[in-house]
Image (tube, coloured by chain):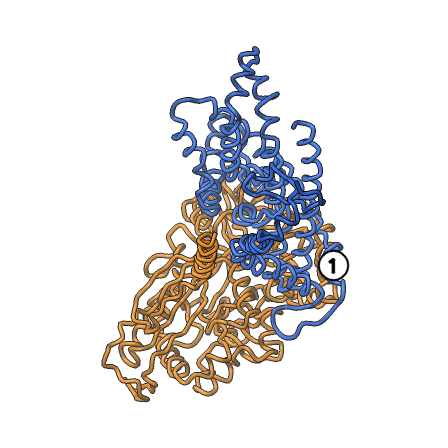
Chain colours: A orange, B blue
Amino acid sequence: MKRRTVMSILLSFALAIGLLAGCGGGESADGTGTETETEAADDDTAAETTAADTEAEAGSEAAATENGGYPTTGEEYEIYYIAISETGGQIQNLLDIVEMYKEQVNPNFTMTIEYITDQQARNQKIRTLAASNELPDWFTCDIDSFFNELWDAGMVANIGDIYDQLGIRDNFYPISLNYPSTDEGEVCGISWQSQSEFFYYNKDVFEAAHIDSVPKTMDELFEVCQKIQETGKVPIAMDGAWRLLRFLAFVPYRMTGNEFIEAAAAGSQPFSSEVGLAGAQFIEDIGQYFQKGWTTADSTTVAQLVVNGDAGMYYSGSWDLNIFGKENMELLDNIGIFTLPALGADDATAPTDGFYNGGTPTVISAECAAEEEFMNFFRFLWDHYNDGAFEHGYLPPGKPSSMEGASELQKELLNNYANAGSFAKCWDVVADVATSEVLLNETPSLTLGDLTPEEWAARLDEAIKQNVQQ
Amino acid sequence: MCNNKGSRIHFPATNGRFRGRVCSRDIQTGGQTELKTKKSKKKIAPWLFSGPALLAYTSVVIVPIICSLGFSFYDYSGVGKRVFNGINNYVRMFRDDTFLIAIKNNLLLMAGSTAIQMVLGLVLAILLSNIRKFTNVLRVAYFVPCIISSAAICQIFSKMFSIVPEGVIPALMRLGGMEQIAFLSDSKWALAIVIILDAYKYVSMHMIIFYSALMDVDESVVEAAIVDGCGWWKLHTKIKIPMIMNIIVMELVLLINGTLKAFDISYILTKGGPGTTTELVVTYMYKTSFGMAKFGVGSAMAVFLAVESLAAVGIVRYIGNKLQRRYT
């Protein structure tokens, strides 16, 4: 009996120890950051990469010093960054600069980047981290209502102030500063690119459909779609992401500029108004020209449809020149571009106005911004970043020291970006995060014909009532 | 002989089969203290064994439920202060059309997936129990979907159903002269595909449980039935299945509970879309909490889910007990 009791106690302890071991964290005890790692994350859309391999030299001194003309603490320092994609030119440029910083300034510097391409998944992760008070040092985040809460709570840095401290504010193009700004005009995010949005089209598909010129108005866009459809090709290649909300915004933007979406997001104008319903009707009508199964298609696959001549048009922007352009960043021979068509003579916007932005901004936590080594790196970064853009196949957010290496197309696009009068605001950014989820959920149903424009508008109005007006 | 009434004693060594009266004098003369010690030890031992598991269960199940209940009365976005707002989150939840659609979808998934898994699991188990050769190979083959991750299964099937680039299923439809259907983008089909894949992933687990139960049926009963002229159909419908009714009821409880909390297939495959076609209570709870940053309403949904699951399990157990009484 005694033995059985002893055994039971021992077994209980063994169970308890097993449980504790199972619950224990798997974090590496190696805090030196002297490893290069690429590990798959649990989410398929995410991958974590230690961007800079920190082959820290054992003899490096951890004292404040100045290397390569740049100040540094010389101490081990790591920036954890949640970014969008590891394939874009901007991130490759950033990684190159991190390497340069390590070689020239501080070998103990590390940037660990977690890539989450899916916008919703990325936002969800950041919101979860914010709720547990564990914001990453840097993170990609739209300037939306959730960001405004972080801003009001003082959890994120004022990027404009940092630019001022470094004396680099004037290097940026106006949209690169205005796009990632609060309503009060404070620059709160970093623009990594100068992005212009437009339609790519396949010239061969247009020719086969006997289309002589690109559409200048929305009516012409429908005519072009109809002609392409009659040849058996897909008129518009579409994926199920943010792109759909751009189509939704086309007509209201042409009718009122940003006035409608700002009023609708604030609850002062319903989606069931004439402008809102016009936008909804447009997307319901244009939806019949998307390829089958578009809601689950991915952007790279559908972009290739246009390159290969299986589809006629694709709404995207300057960042996709690596798909639609040659190595010299001129368009492929069979590809052309045209900008957002006008609605008519009564448009509130100029024909050249459209979607220009600096890409989804990167935000810096207030904690990180207060670090000395962050400022040292940030200064080094912006001394090199704009000049590396053309080499990496994208347009810089600020003025490069020279236009050498830029293609004629890139020069033209950059010129348009630098001189754009106004830019269209993205609906999913202007609307509060809860209404934005409803927009993302309900708009595909509208496009597929499962909801009428009136039903869609009623759901959006209800969402605004629940999320903004109460 | 002792004439007094004595105490009723349970003899553990006889596994409870022998209960008798022991003379109090006998007890007083030495047995009483020993019995008391044994009793107290016997009371401690189960707690010692179950203690760690109970502790883990309390910390990962009970405490979060209580926390969720607390959170559900607050307005909280994850940043800043929580504001008490009474039952407003519950009112909002039930006024939310998408939530009501999610409940409807979830009930359809529960009914469809449970039915497929019960019937198919049982049929496969019966077939396996009747096969003499290669049973191990077949069992492993059937069990493969259960051990593949949901993400991998969803990737495989999204490629199979894809129209652009053309997957296996649209290609077969084209070759068969049929009009291609974008199953995952079509609101008429998307939920059905989610139900089928959910059932496909987990059916083998239930098949194994049914198979074990069928193999456990007393061979002498089966032999007696065969000697009495019982055929294959009657052997299974009148003898084997009634004899594993307790397992069937347990399976029903597990399935209903599991399907009410279904998340992975719907979220990875369609993200609840197109529109809200495949939105489930848990996917919507997740989106509400972490997408819309409404942790209060999300917690209210978590509480609703817990209550819904408990109610469903209660109903199934009630019906199951009646069935068991009828068949045993």
Image quarter of residue B111: top right
Q: Is residue B306 left or right of residue A203?
A: right
Task: Residue at 42% x, 71% y: name it.
Answer: A80
Q: Nearer the viewer, residue B324 or A237?
A: B324
Q: Is residue B157 above or below residue B69?
A: above
Task: Residue at 43% x, 60% y: name it.
Answer: A21
Identify the residue under disc 1.
B90
Return the residue found at the far front.
B1
Q: Is residue B225 above or below residue A184?
A: above
Q: Is residue B273 left or right of residue A47?
A: right
Q: Is residue A421 left or right of residue B6?
A: left
Task: Residue at 59% x, 17% y: name it.
Answer: B234
Output the chain of dot 1.
Answer: B
Q: Nearer the viewer, residue A188 or A427?
A: A188
Image quarter of residue B75: bottom right
Q: Nearer the viewer, residue A11 or B292?
A: A11
Residue B298, x across and y down, in percent: 65, 59
Q: Quadrant of the C terminus of chain A?
A: bottom right
Q: Is residue A243 visible?
A: no
Residue A359, x across and y down, in percent: 49, 67
> How many discs appear?
1
Residue B232, x across and y down, in percent: 54, 16
Residue B309, x across and y down, in percent: 66, 47
